[in-house]
Image: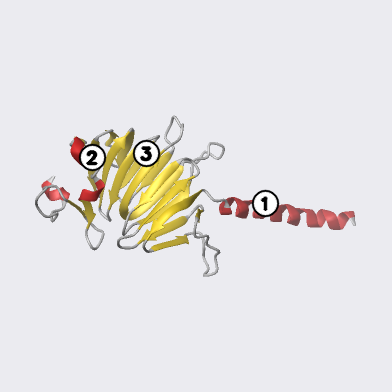
Amino acid sequence: MRKSIRHILPIIISLFFLQSIINAENLNIGKIVKKNGYIMKTNINCETDNCNQDNILIHPGDRILTGKKSEVYILLNDGTALEILEKSDIIIFSIVDKKNKTLTNIFSDYGKFKIIQQNDYLETSLVFKTKTSIIKSVCSTYNLIASETETGIFVYKGEAGFANIDPSIVEAYIIKSGFESYMKKNSLPLHPQSVTVSLRSAWLSRQFLTDKNDRIIIYKNKKGPADWPFIEKK
């Protein structure tokens, strides 16, 4: 009998640790508090068509896509609020965890976002990556627009580090409150520029993506059309 238990014990221990890993992956890290229009939520860790997907809770690896004239509001457990606007694609990998030495980690292929951090962390707690940039922040409020080849940021409150996703491009900026910057693929970020106070609250509404999500268009002339990419006119 004891011999049988000795043989079974390693299996039991293995199953216990496997279940712990599964449970850890299934822990929710936030929730959807409001949504309008077409919203699709999947999980990049799901490899079958039978994954149980809660429509409200956010889990590590959740990917959210929004359709035209759609938006979703998410509150993460670390105090970060995300407003995901129309025609966006975002993946939420994790939230900050001092014990496991992880940060809130988010990636977007393209889209328009508002990020509000309401927590008491004193060091970088959020890392937001796009195809061209990496943003690091703590207790900040900022707007972000990302295309396949460009990224734009405006910091409304606090500050955020803005660097190219390419590690060989070492020059980066700390974007302070009231300033904006843009970055093109494989290029240095543009020197931060102050945004007129009257335009700050409408910064994101003046930013658009092309139909192919490959460029950023800015509505800069108050009376004219928004029909030019910033890289040529900046």
State whether residue 191 appears in this view.
Answer: no
Q: Earlier in the sequence, mark 2 or mark 1?
A: 1
Residue 17: mark in rendering: 1
Closer to the camera in the image, 4 or 122: 122
- Quadrant of the image occupied by residue 41: bottom left
* Image position of 193 (left or right of 18): left
Q: Amino acid at mark 3?
A: Lys
Q: Amino acid at mark 2?
A: Arg
Instruction: Indicate the secondary structure of the residue bearing disc 3.
Output: strand
Question: Mark 2 highlights which residue?
Answer: 200
Closer to the camera in the image, 147 or 198: 198
The residue positioned 28% from the left and 49% from the top of the image is 145
Residue 43 location (% of width, % of height): 48, 60
Instruction: Indicate the secondary structure of the residue bearing disc 2.
Output: helix
Residue 136: mark in rendering: 3
* Image position of 136 (left or right of 53): left
Q: Quadrant of the C terminus?
A: top left
Q: CA distance from mark 2 to mark 1?
A: 50 Å
Residue 116 location (% of width, % of height): 38, 41
Q: CA distance from mark 1 to mark 3?
A: 33 Å
129 in relation to 122, above or below:
below
Q: How many marks?
A: 3
State whether residue 143 appears in this view.
Answer: yes
Q: Quadrant of the N terminus?
A: bottom right
Instruction: Indicate the secondary structure of the residue bearing disc 1.
Output: helix
